[in-house]
Image (spheres, grey):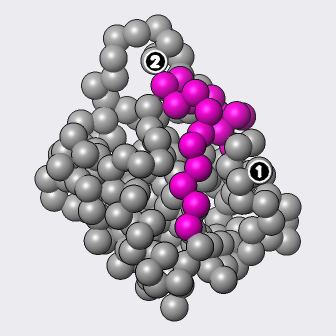
Amino acid sequence: MKQVFIIHGWDGYPEENWFPWLKRELEAKGFEVFVPQLPSPDLPEINSWVSKLSKTVGIPDERTYFVGHSIGCQTIVRYIESLSDDVRIGGVVFVAGFFKRLTNLEDDEDVRQTAKQWLESTVDFSKVVSHIKKSVAIFSDNDFYVPLDNQDDFRDKLGSKIIIEHNKGHFNTKAGVTELPIVLEELLKMTE
C-alpha cells in the first residue's frame, strides 16, 4: 500500500490548514496517510523533528511519499538526507518550503534562534536527490513568510518541478486555504 506522510510547519498541528482535507482525499483513493504531531511546534528543533519523523515512518520505500508545509519541507529533506544509501522513496511535494530566507518573523530572540538553526544548518542536497524519484515545490506569489527566491534551491539543488500559485499566502487557514487541489493533483501524478 502506498503511504503518504504529511508534515506540518512551525506552530503547526495535524488538524490545521488543508491537511485534514488532503488526508480524506488520499484515503478515499486507497492511500495510508499519516499526519504526525511533531514536538514543540512553537520552537521546532531539527534533531527532534527529524527523529520523530524517522520513528513515525519506520522503513520507507518507493511506495512512500511525503508532503511538507513550510518548515515541514526542511524536516522531510533532512530526514531523507539521513537515510541509508540503498533507500529510495517515491517522491515529495513541498509547499512553501525554504532554505534561503524567511521574512516577517516576530522580533523575538527564541524565534530568531529557531529560524537561524534551520537556515544555517547545511544540507547535502546531492545525497537527498539520490533518494527521491520525483519532487515538486509549490510557492505562492504573496507568501508573507517565504519569498519566491526560495524556489531556486528546490529547482537547482533538488531538481524539483516548480509551481507558483497566486494569492495563496502561506497556504494556511489564515490565508483562506483549507483545500489545496494542486498538491493532490501533483501527488497523484507522482504515484502513477
Label 1: element kind: helix
Residue farthest along the left direction in this orientation: 167
Label 2: element kind: helix
42 magenta-colored: yes
Label 2: few (<14), some (14–19) or many (≥20) C-alpha neighbours in 10 Å? some
Amino acid type, residue under disc 2 in the picture: Val
Circle nearer the viewer, 1 or 2? 1
User: From the viewer's perspective, is residue 60 above or below residue 140?
Assistant: below
Is any part of residue 150 visible from this angle?
no
Which x, y percent locates residue 112? Answer: 46, 16
**Point 31% across, 35% down: residue:** 145
User: From the viewer's perspective, is residue 126 above or below residue 132?
Assistant: above
Which x, y percent locates residue 59? Answer: 80, 65
Label 1: few (<14), some (14–19) or many (≥20) C-alpha neighbours in 10 Å? few
Which x, y percent locates residue 7? Answer: 53, 51
Is any part of residue 87 visible from this angle?
yes
Q: Is residue 165 left or right of residue 30?
A: left
Q: In front here: 94 or 102?
A: 94
Q: Are marks 1 and 2 in contact (CB under 8 Å)?
A: no
Q: Is residue 31 left or right of residue 130?
A: left
- Disc 1 to disc 2, how far (Cα)? 26 Å
Q: Which residue is mark 1?
A: 55
Amino acid type, residue under disc 1 in the picture: Lys
Q: Is residue 117 left or right of residue 51?
A: left
User: From the viewer's perspective, is residue 188 above or below residue 166?
Assistant: below
Q: Quadrant of residue 65?
A: bottom right
Q: Is residue 44 left or right of residue 49?
A: left
Which residues are drawn in magenta? 33-50
Q: Which residue is mark 2?
A: 111
